[in-house]
Image (cartoon, rainbow, N blue to C red):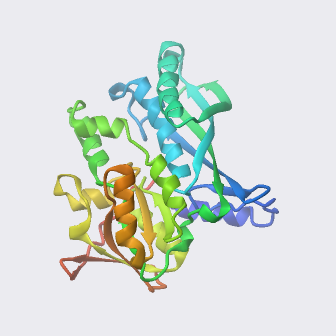
Amino acid sequence: MTEFGFIETIRATFASIPDNAFEGIGDDCAILPTDGDEALVFTSDALCEGVHFLRESSTPFDIGAKSATVNLSDIAAMGARPIATLLSLALPQEAVGEWAEEFIRGYHSVSSRYGVKLVGGDTTGSKTGVFVSVTAIGRVKRANIKRRSSAKPGDTILVGGVLGESAIGLSDILSGNPHSAAAQLHRNPVAQIEEGEWLGTQECVHAMMDISDGLSSDLQHILTASHVGAIIDTEKIPAANADVRNAVCGGEDYKLLFTVATDCVTDLIATFERRFGYTPYPIGTITADSDCHIEWRENGRRVSHTDWQGFTHF
């Protein structure tokens, strides 16, 4: 069973239970409309030692900060503002005390930067390493919610920054170079929180999510949800070290991936740059391909990259 096959099994199993006003499985967050014109959005993410971090090559402060960052990134990907989190920790005996306190200081450093309150959670022991589970909550005007299912044929596809740096950093760590700039970035990702909330206010921005499992996998989520295809110009992908395959397949970049009505792209990029000091990168176009394929092109010529796959959890 694949990860997404399992998700479909979950969806089918719970289909008979009333949704209680929630818009659930399928986006970076679940959505709960509230009174007036607002909604709350909810996301939950787990980080496991040995899968998402290596305790021997990361400080507890870094792990705590990353645990908060990756969850707030999901909130931003919906066009929402994060307002609160819940944190659950399973700790082996050697991580109780000083390690856990330093983890919380790292978690607090990110939370305080964005004004996000830790409002609850759980702690328990573990016999197999550190396990972290975070639930993040955001607030957004309903009209500003950005879903994966809203991409339209003709939209321009953009990414919020250079891709592949985190994957390079992980490679550096595993090869015994844990102090490189890329390794530091891998341990300390930066979510595009303000950018996501601002993009939520832009009507010409249609679909959006963050890149956590790699451009190839995450773009496919948008295409499948929107019943469209895509043409990607590989020479336009902002690849760290000019390694396009790494940029496409490597995960944990946490840059925003979004589609924009083409007649708005130039103005949106200019306004984005004035506001945030850098520009997003247009890398391709949404097509009316109901089979939801990604067509890779290099300098206008179609190329086959069947091995370009993002991270898979199972």
Residue 42 placement (x, y as % from top left): 65, 49
Q: Is residue 160 visible?
A: no
Quick one: 221 or 34, which is closer to the camera? 34
Looking at the image, the residue that sits furthest to the top is 97
User: Is 184 on the left-hand or right-hand side of 286?
Assistant: left
Quick one: 84 or 46, which is closer to the camera? 84
Quick one: 132 or 143, which is closer to the camera? 143
Residue 31 sits in quarter: bottom right
Quick one: 100 or 51, which is closer to the camera? 100
User: Is 163 on the left-hand or right-hand side of 76?
Assistant: left
Residue 254 placement (x, y as % from top left): 41, 50
Number of callouts in the render? 0
Residue lying at 43% horizontally and 41% vertically, measured from the top left: 51
User: Is 159 on the left-hand or right-hand side of 88?
Assistant: left
Residue 204 placement (x, y as % from top left): 49, 71
Instruction: From this view, report whether residue 252 is shown above or below residue 97.
Output: below
Residue lying at 29% horizontally and 67% vertically, measured from the top left: 307
Residue 179 placement (x, y as % from top left): 23, 30
Instruction: From this view, report whether residue 142 is shown above or below residue 288.
Output: above
Instruction: From this view, report whether residue 69 is shown above or below residue 263.
Output: above
Q: Is residue 8 visible?
A: yes
